[in-house]
Amino acid sequence: MQHLADSPLAPLTTLRLGGPARRLYEATTTAELVAVVRDADDHGTPLLLIGGGSNLVIGDEGFDGIVVRVATKGHTLSPSGLLSSDAGVRWDHLVETAVDAGLAGVEFLSGVPGSTGATPIQNVGAYGQEVAETISLVEVYDRKTGRMDMLDASECGFSYRDSMFKTPADPADAGRFVVLRVHFQLRDEGGLSAPVRYAEVARVLGVEPGGRVPLATARETVLGLRRGKGMVLDEADHDTWSAGSFFTNPVLTDAEFAALEQRVADRLGADAAAPRYPAGEGHAKTSAAWLIERAGFAKGHGTGPARISTKHTLALTNRGGAKTEDLLALAREVRDGVREAFGVELVNEPVFVGAEL
C-alpha cells in the first residue's frame, strides 16, 4: 500500500482544491482499506476517506491526519441481476456494465462522477432515479465495533440525497461506517429502461413521462444532457472543475412553499411561479437553480477564479488558480442572495472538510 507524507489533496478532487494531507495512503484491496482505518482509529488519528473526490470540498489548510484514497476495483454480476461492486470502482463504469448486460435500474445515473462506495452515502440521484431504488445490501466496516457488517437497504436511512451514513441519528456516529462493497439488484426489462420520470429526458427522447426506451438510448441521452451542462468530467473544460450540483433542491413545508410563492409574486410579478414537485405529504420540493437564477445569479457569474458554471447554474467552478476560500465566498454570496430574495436557505450538497459556509 502506497504511503506519501504531506501530499496535496487538490488533484484527488474534481474541484482541484484543498491543501495537503499529513499522510496519504492508497488502498487497492478491502483488507488494506480496513487495516489502515483500524490503525488510524487505534492511534486516535483523524481519518478522511476519498473515492472519486467529486462531492468533496477540502479547506485550504488541508487535512491534519490520515487520508485514504479508496482504490478497490472488483465487481461481479450474478445471473439474477445482482451487481456487486467494491467501493473504489468508478461509478459510471458500473452503470455501463449494467446497461451492456441489458439490466435496468441505474441507466439514468450515467455520467455521475465519483466512486461506487460514495453512492449510498449521498443516495446519489439524477434525472428521476436514485441508487436507493436498487441497493439491496451495503457491506461496511463498523469503526465502533471493529467488525465487518452487512446492512440491508432498509437500515441505511435513505432519503433525498441523504442516508444514515451521511446524517446519522446520533451525531456521535458520524463517520462510523466505512463502505466496502455495494450490492445493486437490477431488473431485466427486456432491454428497456425504467420508466422515464424526468420531463427534460422525456422531451429529448420524444416520449411521454412513464415511457420506456432502449437502455443504450437512455444512457447516451443522459450523457449528452450532462455534457451540455458541464457535468461529465473533462480536464480541458473548466465548467467540469466542480463538485456537481453545489446546492440541493429545497424541500419545504406547504406553509413555507406558500410563503415562497408570495415572495416570488412580490419580486417577479403575479404570473411568476416557482417550480413545485412532490416531496411527501405536507411538503413540496422546488428548484435551487430556478431560485439562484431569479435571485440575480446568471450562468458565468463571478469575476474571480471561482465562478458559476457557464453551462449550469447549480455548479460552482474553479476556473484555474482558485483557492477553496474563493469558492466558499462565491457559495456564501449565492446562498445569502437567495435567502434575501426568497426567504429560502440553500443547503450545500458536497461534503465539507476543514471548510464551512
Image (spheres, rainbow, N blue to C red):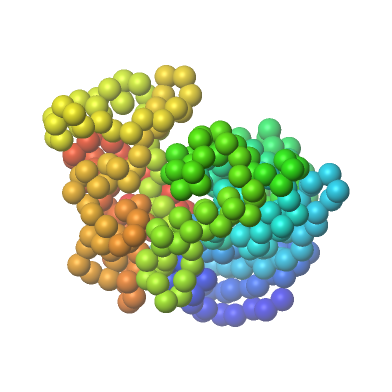
273 vs 219: above or below: above
Q: Nearer the viewer, residue 4 or 319?
A: 319
Return the x and y of residue 229 as percentages of the image width and height.
40, 58
46 vs 163: above or below: below
Return the x and y of residue 37 as percentages of the image width and height.
68, 61
Quarter of the rendering containing residue 49 = bottom right
Residue found 25% across the figure and 47% down from its top: 293
Residue found 23% across the figure and 40% down from its top: 339
273 vs 190: above or below: above
Farthest residue in the front direction? 206
Q: Nearer the viewer, residue 167 or 257?
A: 257
Question: Can residue 137 be seen from the camera position used here?
Answer: no
Farthest residue in the right direction? 79
Residue found 35% across the figure and 64% down from its top: 317
Q: Is residue 30 left or right of residue 105?
A: right
Q: Is residue 92 left or right of residue 188?
A: left
Q: Is residue 263 left or right of residue 56?
A: left
Quarter of the rendering containing residue 269 = top left
Instruction: Tell how many labels.
Output: 0
Question: Can residue 126 be seen from the camera position used here?
Answer: yes
Q: Is residue 282 left or right of residue 67?
A: left
